[in-house]
Image (spheres, grey):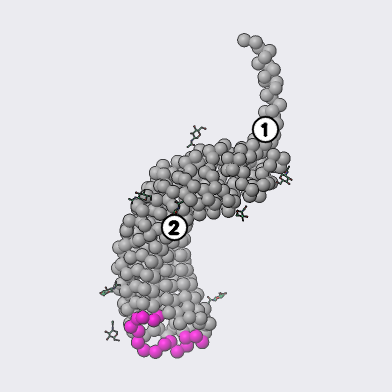
């Protein structure tokens, strides 16, 4: 073994090590330039060159001189995501939204072990969401909306315990969604809307466990059965949109006691029975219960909703008189009650206190 040779090797390699230790961005720049090439060098990435620091490129965010975010929204990307991307060991955010990326879910990303935010929305992805997606265990933000993902949404998604945002709207899912989503105790936004190829399904009782949920966006998702009573427990809810489904039964009595509720859309279902008479949701701005089969009278308490801007109750079987207090709501601009069986007179002060635009 010629020992001197080994020494020379050490001597040669030492300076290089020193350089790359001082400037980790040099190494990360070569990774990014390779990535650019693998993406077909789109002209949108012109500023990615070998003389500038990647931390100065508009699409890159660094922290402590190391790449942490890649923001490639609307960059005309047409290629699959190369495995190279996970050589950036500190990557936490990857935004690939609004491109033309084809193929199945990019499992290459399983090697991005620090990933927290993944936006694949508005691309050409197809096939299932893999049933071991929980391997990217630190995910806090998912937006896979507006793609052609199909099959079932896997129960594994309920094991991504850090998730705060889960957007799966507008896909081609032709299976089911899992009750395990109810286990996501940090979830604030859940978007499953515009998935009308779902197998008809009830809303899982377990969704009532989502104590931190602020937005439930579930329009046009082929929902059947009743709204579970457990929804009375969604105490953080601000936006509840279950419109354009096939829901039946009553509106749970507690829905109008969720303090922070601002928008309630239950229109275009088959809901029946009376509108709950106890109304404590004083922050409500919009209520749309139109196109159902609701009976009974319009709750007097609706007059308490001083923030209300929209009240749609048309196409139901509501009867009796409108409470005159509705005429006192100052910001009411949209008020539609046609196609019911209402009687009596309109609230005398309607339109005097607010700028009604539609009635
Ligand atoms: C994407 O391509 C279109 C059409 O080729 C072009 O008009 C647009 O400027 C491109 N966008 C970017 C960010 O390069
Ligand atoms: C490299 O990109 C930077 C901007 O990121 C630009 O200012 C510089 O002119 C570019 N250099 C070459 C050689 O293209
Ligand atoms: C990742 O970040 C840590 C802490 O900021 C840093 O020590 C390390 O060098 C970075 N890794 C790479 C590959 O740049
Ligand atoms: C992750 O990286 C390892 C080692 O580089 C490689 O063997 C493996 O195939 C990668 N996994 C994925 C899913 O790309
Ligand atoms: C996605 O689905 C739509 C509607 O079914 C279809 O028109 C489109 O061709 C599909 N796109 C891809 C990339 O599969
Ligand atoms: C769901 O859609 C995928 C993709 O279009 C198709 O391959 C699969 O057979 C469909 N599954 C069912 C149960 O319809
Ligand atoms: C609401 O939450 C409480 C406390 O966690 C629980 O005991 C109760 O069963 C829940 N109600 C419904 C209808 O799920
Ligand atoms: C409304 O309810 C009546 C009975 O109360 C029923 O006959 C009718 O089919 C229902 N309409 C809808 C659209 O569900
Ligand atoms: C009415 O609307 C205005 C402007 O949208 C807003 O500033 C005001 O707080 C609202 N008042 C009430 C009582 O909701
Ligand atoms: C409408 O209300 C009147 C009483 O005000 C009642 O006689 C009638 O049966 C109701 N019609 C429907 C379709 O419910």
Q: Which residue is mark 2?
A: 170
Sequence-wise, the earlier of marks 1 and 2 is 1
Residue 198 lies in the magenta stretch: no
Q: Residues within 10 Å of mark 1 (few under 14, many from 20)?
A: few
Of helix, strand and loop, which mostly describes the magenta segment? loop
Residue at 31% x, 62% y is 224
Q: Which residue is mark 1?
A: 21
Q: Is residue 16 above or below residue 347?
A: above
Where residue 107 sits in the image (x, y, percent)? Answer: 47, 41
Ligand 5 placement by image quarter? bottom left
Whether residue 61 appears in this view of the structure is no
Secondary structure of the residue carrying tag 1 is: helix
Is ligand 3 within 8 Å of the beta carbon of the residue shown at mark 1? no
Q: Is residue 257 above or below residue 52?
A: below
Query: Between residues 221 and 183, which one lies in front from this camera angle?
Result: 221
Q: Is residue 103 above or below residue 195?
A: above
Secondary structure of the residue carrying tag 2 is: loop
Residue 346 lies in the magenta stretch: yes
Residue at 36% x, 53% y is 174
How many angstroms separate mark 1 from mark 2 (CA)? 45 Å
Q: Which residues are magenta?
A: 337-352
Where residue 18 sits in the image (x, y, percent)? Answer: 69, 29
Where residue 54 sits in the image (x, y, percent)? Answer: 66, 43
């Amino acid at each position: 073994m010629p020992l001197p040779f080994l020494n020379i090797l050490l001597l040669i390699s030492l300076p290089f090590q020193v350089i790359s230790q001082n400037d980790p961005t040099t190494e990360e720049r070569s990774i990014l330039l390779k990535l650019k090439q693998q993406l077909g060098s789109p002209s949108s990435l012109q500023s990615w060159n070998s003389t500038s620091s990647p931390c100065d490129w508009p699409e890159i965010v660094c922290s402590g001189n190391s790449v942490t975010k890649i923001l490639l929204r609307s960059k005309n990307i047409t290629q699959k995501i190369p495995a190279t991307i996970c050589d950036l060991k500190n990557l936490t955010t990857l935004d690939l939204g609004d491109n033309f990326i084809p193929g199945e879910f990019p499992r290459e990303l399983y090697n991005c072990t620090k990933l927290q935010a993944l936006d694949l929305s508005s691309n050409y992805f197809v096939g299932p969401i893999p049933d071991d997606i929980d391997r990217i265990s630190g995910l806090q933000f998912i937006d896979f909306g507006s793609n052609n993902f199909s099959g079932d949404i896997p129960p594994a998604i309920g094991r991504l315990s850090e998730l705060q945002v889960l957007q799966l709207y507008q896909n081609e899912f032709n299976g089911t969604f899992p009750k395990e989503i109810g286990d996501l105790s940090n979830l604030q936004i859940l978007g499953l809307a515009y998935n009308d190829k779902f197998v008809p399904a009830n809303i899982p009782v377990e969704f009532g466990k989502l104590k931190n949920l602020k937005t439930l966006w579930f329009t046009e998702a082929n929902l059947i059965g009743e709204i579970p009573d457990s929804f009375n427990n969604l105490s953080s809810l601000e936006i509840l949109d279950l419109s354009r489904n096939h829901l039946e039964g009553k509106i749970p009595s507690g829905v109008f006691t969720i303090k922070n509720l601002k928008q309630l859309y239950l229109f275009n279902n088959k809901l029946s029975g009376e509108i709950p008479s106890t109304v404590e949701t004083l922050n409500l701005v919009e209520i749309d219960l139109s196109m159902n089969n609701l009976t009974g009278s319009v709750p007097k308490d609706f007059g308490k909703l001083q923030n209300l801007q929209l009240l749609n109750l048309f196409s139901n079987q509501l009867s009796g008189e409108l409470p005159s207090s509705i005429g006192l709501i100052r910001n009411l601009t949209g008020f539609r009650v046609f196609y019911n069986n209402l009687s009596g007179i309109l609230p005398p002060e309607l339109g005097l206190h607010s700028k009604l635009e539609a009635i």
